[in-house]
Image: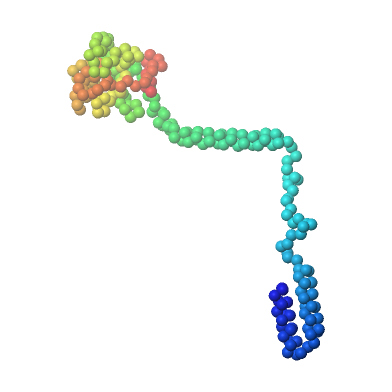
Amino acid sequence: MSQQLTSASTALLRACARQQLPTNVARSAIAAGQQRGVAAKSSFESPFGRSEETDTLKIPNFKKYTSKVSPTTNKVFSYFVAGTMGLGSAVGAKATVQDFLVNMSASADVLAQAKVEVALGAIPEGKNVIIKWRGKPVFIRHRTGSEIEEANNIDIQSLRDPQADEDRVQKPEWLIMLGVCTHLGCVPIGEAGDFGGWFCPCHGSHYDISGRIRKGPAPLNLEVPSYSFPDDDTLVIG
């Protein structure tokens, strides 16, 4: 603004010099212009200015939004909400895991094959019966008195897989075993071999009348599955 006034005064003096105006007239014009500039300068107020009397920085008051109850009550409510959400999440996770395990469990037809019931009255003494259980053959032998005595008269310390006959049977007259050779999984032949029990023709493993390995490459005795006798004439395998 001051630069503009100075330029205007200089231009006015030059015009007076050209037109040979009286000096007092030029001076009066210059003084009037300077007064108008000062008045304009004093009346100008910046929109970004900040007066000393009025503070434009106002902090909002949030008191009407604050809770009217005590802080302890607020904490109890917060803990209750958090606990409820945690409990709900735990129940949902349990239900999800339970449904997943139910879907992964065995179906009804598989469970039906988990146990096999056999009528023992149909098996004469001194004979073998082969049944299928869980896709594997099971040997059921109704042993005679002489076979039981022969099985008990063996020195178990001389066996490759030492096991007493009484540890392999629940009833001495009934011998139940898996019909799978412990060498390579073949099916041995009953009433054969050098010891009157079972013989595996694949690699020459001989088992006695108690299903214990006596000769050949098989490392272990024939496996005995889990079974029970609900009554004297019934056998349940599994």
* Residue at 65 percent of width and 34 percent of height: 80
Q: Is residue 2 above or below residue 52?
A: below
Res 22 → quadrant: bottom right
Residue 142 falls in which quadrant of the image?
Answer: top left
Q: Is residue 129 above or below residue 19?
A: above
Say if residue 20 shows up in the picture: yes
The percent coordinates of residue 37 (x first, y second) are 76, 74
In the image shown, does 3 or 195 lie closer to the viewer?
3
Q: Position of residue 206 (x, y in %)?
A: 21, 20
Residue at the image point whose x is 31% and y is 16% from the top:
168
Drawn side of residue 143 relative to residue 48, left or right? left
State the quadrant of the C terminus: top left
Judge from the rendering whether residue 40 lies leftward or rightward of residue 187; answer left or right: right
Task: Pinpoint residue 210: horizontal percent, then vertical percent.
Answer: 27, 16
- The number of callouts visible is 0
Residue at 69% from the left image edge and 37% from the top image edge: 74
Q: For this view, does 189 lie left or right of residue 86?
A: left
Q: Nearer the viewer, residue 140 or 195?
A: 195
Where is residue 188? Give x, y as percent.
24, 24
From this view, report whether residue 229 is shown above or below residue 94: above
Q: Residue, x 32% and y 20% (percent of image)?
A: 224
Q: Nearer the viewer, residue 110 or 117?
A: 110
Give whichever of 69, 206 is nearer the camera.
69
